[in-house]
């Protein structure tokens, strides 16, 4: 078992992921120091942390100064930042603005890699977000009572290729398909909005396919699904949620599967073999 410094930092967005990590890190004997984002991070999620500093989106200098003051040499990125916030709630300090102006592509990977690089230049190592929580990775196989039909398998295979393609371009990680047609592609609005857009066009029986990006970095931006994902799909009478197994986070598994069974939705973790074959 590797040994780690006593303190670990969290750069927190929204959702429950930071809370789950705080609890796991405490169980591992770590002192948890959190940077929380105003307007994104829920106060109750980071309440169990040992120390919390609230920042506005873009205040990189404040994050670095806080971690240095607290003696943090390792950190993780946890939780989502609403992507559209960069257009209305970005308040960079001098260090944040300087970094922002060097980023050629304001897509997820470009921004996160640049921030991680800036932190590591300050001797703050960015670790994998699944440290302590690998049990949350999406499992392989069908999780629900209802199974896939042959036509749904075809739609998954069709959607898989297109989801991979938009991932290579760092556009998104999710597509909505029906009858071998792409109805919606994830962009800056995120997965839930994509499901609603595609589901309305499908009218019913939409198939949602969510995969990792080909260059997925486990330090940040892992795809994530949970109860809310299924609820959005149920609201548009969707039929299938297919997620790449082992490469995505799954929250609230029991509640999500129960809701899927109630709505007649198939939830499946899909594995791609070395030769490109999909296993359900």
Image (cartoon, helix red, strand yellow):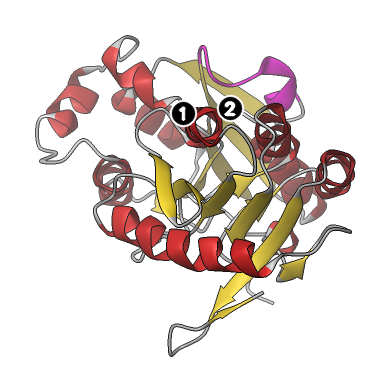
Residue 16 occupies quadrant: top right
What is the magenta range?
38-47
* Cβ atoms at labels 2 and 1 below 8 Å apart: yes
| Viewer can see residue 4 | no
The residue singled out by tag 1 in the image is 81
Instruction: Report the side of 104 relative to 258 (left or right).
Output: left
Instruction: Name the dominant secondary structure of the magenta segment.
Output: loop
Residue shown at the point (30%, 26%) measured from the top left: 61
Local secondary structure at mark 1: loop
- Vertical relation: 127 (above or below) 108: below
- Image location of residue 191, percent across then percent down: 51, 37
Instruction: Report the side of 64 relative to 149 (left or right).
Output: left
- Name the quarter where the N terminus is drawn: bottom right
Instruction: Report the side of 147 relative to 201 (left or right).
Output: right
- Image location of residue 30, percent across then percent down: 70, 49
**Of 21 and 14, the residue lying toward us:** 14
- Image location of residue 5, percent across then percent down: 58, 57
């Amino acid at each position: 078992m590797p040994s780690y410094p006593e303190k670990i930092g969290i750069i927190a967005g929204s959702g429950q992921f930071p809370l789950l990590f705080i609890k796991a890190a405490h169980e591992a004997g770590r002192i948890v120091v959190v940077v929380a984002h105003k307007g994104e991070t829920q106060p109750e999620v980071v309440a169990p942390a040992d120390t919390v500093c609230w920042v506005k989106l873009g205040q990189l200098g404040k994050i670095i100064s806080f971690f240095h003051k607290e003696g943090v040499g390792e950190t993780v990125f946890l939780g989502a930042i609403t992507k559209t916030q960069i257009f209305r709630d970005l308040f960079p300090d001098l260090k944040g603005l300087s970094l922002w102006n060097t980023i050629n592509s304001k897509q997820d990977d470009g921004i996160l890699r640049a921030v991680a690089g800036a932190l590591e230049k300050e001797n703050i190592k960015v670790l994998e977000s699944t440290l302590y929580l690998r049990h949350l990775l999406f499992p392989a196989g069908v999780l629900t009572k209802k199974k896939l039909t042959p036509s749904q398998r075809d739609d998954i295979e069709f959607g898989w290729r297109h989801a991979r393609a938009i991932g290579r371009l760092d556009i998104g990680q999710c597509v909505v398909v029906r009858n071998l047609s792409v109805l919606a592609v994830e962009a800056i609005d995120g997965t839930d909005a994509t499901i609603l857009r595609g589901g309305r066009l499908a009218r019913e029986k939409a198939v949602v396919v969510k995969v990792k990006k080909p260059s997925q970095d486990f330090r940040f931006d892992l795809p994530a699904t949970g109860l809310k994902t299924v609820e959005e799909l149920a609201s548009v009478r969707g039929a299938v949620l297919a997620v790449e197994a082992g490469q995505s986070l799954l929250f609230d598994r029991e509640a999500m599967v129960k809701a899927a069974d109630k709505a007649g939705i198939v939830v499946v973790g899909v594995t791609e073999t070395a030769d490109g074959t999909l296993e359900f």
